[in-house]
Amino acid sequence: MAVTAWSITQSGRYEPFELQVARGQISWHQSITVFGFNSDVDTAVETVWPQGGILTFPATALQLSVSSNNAADTSAGTGARTVYLEGLDANHNTISEVVTLNGQTAVTTTGSYLRINNCYVKTAGSGDSAAGTIYFGTGTVTAGVPATIYDVIAFDYNSRITGSYTIPAGYTGYISQGLFSSGQVSGSNAVTGRLMTRGTNDIRLTAAVVTVNNGIADYAFEYPLVVPEKTTIEAQAVGDAANNACSSMFIILLVKNDAST
């Protein structure tokens, strides 16, 4: 019979709540860590994500095209072979699937997605990595790049680095901590990082603002920031000058609103 490996002190049966959540020992609770990276933020507001500019979302749930800009990312190739995709459907409920890639030729998802919350390379060939950037979008696909891009798995990262997450229906999110960092060659110009929320009324609200100059800022909420269901959280950045590399991180505790369902 298997014996549970308890994470407790020698003198008492105590285990931090955060560790218990991470281990799946607290029912109806889930921890989510969202990372974002944008290598070139200029003087207009951008989402902290690899594609640059402001992240956009479908107006309605859509089946998405999944493709790579490298032909080696295919079912029997040396690059990525399958990717895991997780997001929200038209009712903001969580859906997911595994997509088998076909290089620069688009593969259509089974599900229809209103939001993407997670994606990563699930299996790969001898390269143990995606050979190119993998795109999730709609419209005409040219050399593996769709006309409208809703998210990406950037080359050499193999997982999502888009600073955005939408709270599923039936859950409330609680943000306890976040980080924003920025660097530039000159180091003489400030970069402003913003944590934004957007509900079903589409109004963007500012939840936190930090300013750095070749540095890092930590924003901690002593009383966690409450994020209602169906609300999108997004990290943004804008520079006083061009060519800033920016990264973001925020931690969400998802709690089910009704434990009886």
Image (cartoon, helix red, strand yellow):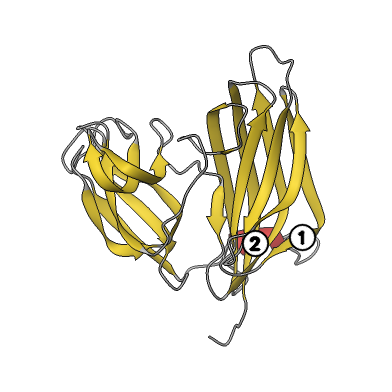
Write the residue at 33% across / 64% down: 112
Between 13 and 110, the one lying in front of the other is 110
Q: Amino acid at mark 2?
A: Leu
Reading the image, the residue beneath label 1 is: 224
Q: Is residue 7 visible?
A: no
Per the image, label 2 sits on a secondary structure element best described as strand
Rounded to the nearest angstrom, the CA distance separating label 1 from label 2 is 9 Å
Number of on-image labels: 2
Above or below: residue 232 compared with residue 35? below
Write the residue at 69% across / 43% down: 194
- 76 sits to left or right of 253: left
Write the residue at 73% across / 20% down: 189
Instruction: Assess disc 1: are there few (<14), some (14-19) or many (≥20) residues with their C-alpha within 10 Å of its C-alpha.
Output: some
Reading the image, the residue beneath label 2 is: 253
x, y (%) of residue 211? 76, 33
Q: Amino acid at mark 1?
A: Pro
